[in-house]
Image (cartoon, grey):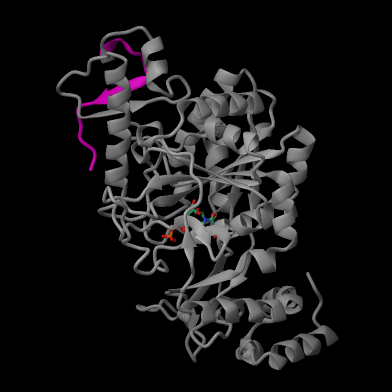
Amino acid sequence: MASLGSNLESIRRTFAKHGQEHVFDFWDQLDASGQQRLFDQLSQLAPNLPAWIEGRKRAIDGLSKVQNSRLELVPVEVLPEFGGDAEIRDSAREAGEALLAAGRVGLLVVAGGQGTRLGFEGPKGAFPVGPVSDRSLFGLQAQKIRGLSRRLGRSVSWYVMTSPATDFETRALFRAENFFGLDPSDVMFFSQAQVPCCDFEGNLILEAPDTLAESPNGHGGSLLALVESGALDDMARRGIDRIFYYQVDNPLIRIADPVLMGLHELQGSEMSCKVVRKRDPDEKVGVVARVDGQIGIVEYTEIQEPEKSQTDEAGQLVFWPGNIAIHAFSTDFVRRVAEEADALLPYHASAKKILQVNSQGQTVAPSEPNGYKLERFVFDALPGAAHVSVLEVRPKEEFAPIKNAKGKDSPASVRGELDRQYRAWLQDADISVPAGIKVIEIDHAHVDSAEEAKALGIDRLEEATSMIRGSTGMRV
Ligand code: UTP
């Protein structure tokens, strides 16, 4: 806690110099603890205020910039059904399995987002996604990690990035669930930083008379937080030098996919991406491409015609590789990006509804967006990588994120995708499902693929123990 006294005047001058003196509007009405709270927040921000001012200026200017970038295709390791080389995948899988067996891969889940579109009270990772048991997204991922550890015969370290908005509840959930059967010493929590929001003129916002409005600094903040929290040092101590990165909201995630990790390794990459085939020009996924000569992502809001809808002779989109936010990183690269974060990971502005005080000092929830949240994006690190591997995967097998409360990418659609995957595994394994069973759920700690279902050596769902459960009730 910084002490007020003469520091107060210097802080006031700093904010006034940058046209932000309004943050003191309610100072005289605050009690001592309120003054201390605001002072602490402002004195932390003060040394970074010029960088924040510059960062938010670039972010806001970026909104009106017309992207006229030259796009070129990047090499992609495509699926065998589209002409890819199955042998390359096999060698990649072997190399990835060797990395995993040697304990060189750490898992990073980014779980600091506010999940505003879903509108769920609590961290998104706590969302009940199990079609039968209501197990949470974290719980389902923990089962997958237990399955992975079982196959490898060793533990795998899981780094869980939270934010001040999700940290407390995330840790409490893990404790309440006994770490979902994982060894607590293999689960590390660390929090990303917050960044102040700004109004449409670029000014700081008071959300309460003694508090600036802030929000988590985006999934790109994970690369800084890994360094600042000491998580990267922890990885080094454990002999981890490769990171499997994924988002908390995708229950189909193939955790630590050896094919991605191995391709990254064999090709000497610093950062790698999984992509899916975009079929419709309006699909809301960013495209991995060479942008003005450098590999990067063109966001769906930025890709312009003619490239957006350009097709080849077969009628397929030319710029088809859609980014699904599953990456591999080398830890040296993460350290380098974090050191140059302001250059490599610029802020992006998005208009949001942000709590704000009115002239009487009362906090008001606006009905329309009233300012910008600022976020760093993890994929902005791509152009800084000496080499990038891009691997095509099948969305039905690996990608079904929960984003919205209803419709596309909603809990109902994602539970449907999980049920569909489970039924496909059982069908491949010749395990029959009684007609009355409406939904199925499989415990990934025991069965994590069609092959593992087959290895159970059973013919009927009823023979499976609690590893595979069916329910006659239909979830909504
Ligand atoms: P999204 O950008 O989809 O955000 O995050 P969200 O918080 O889940 O949902 P909305 O946009 O508010 O509706 C994709 C992934 O990145 C993480 C999220 O937790 C999710 O796993 N993320 C996002 C962070 O960890 N920190 C952030 O600051 C933003």
Is residue 466 a member of the stretch shown in magenta? Answer: yes
Among the 4 quarters of the image, the one containing residue 145: top right
Place of residue 106 in the rendered image (x, y in percent of width and height, measured from the top left): 64, 37
Quarter the C terminus occupies: top left
Quarter the N terminus occupies: bottom right
Q: Going by the image, does 100 lie left or right of 310? A: right
Place of residue 4 in the rendered image (x, y in percent of width and height, measured from the top left): 80, 81
Among the 4 quarters of the image, the one containing residue 466: top left
Residue positioned most to the front: 313
Residue positioned most to the left: 435
Per the rendered image, the range of residues in magenta is: 462-476
Q: Going by the image, does 279 lie left or right of 389? A: left
Residue 405 lies, with reference to residue 268, above or below; the image says below
The secondary structure that dominates the magenta segment is loop
- Looking at the image, which is closer to me, 31 or 130? 130
Residue 80 lies, with reference to residue 246, above or below; the image says above
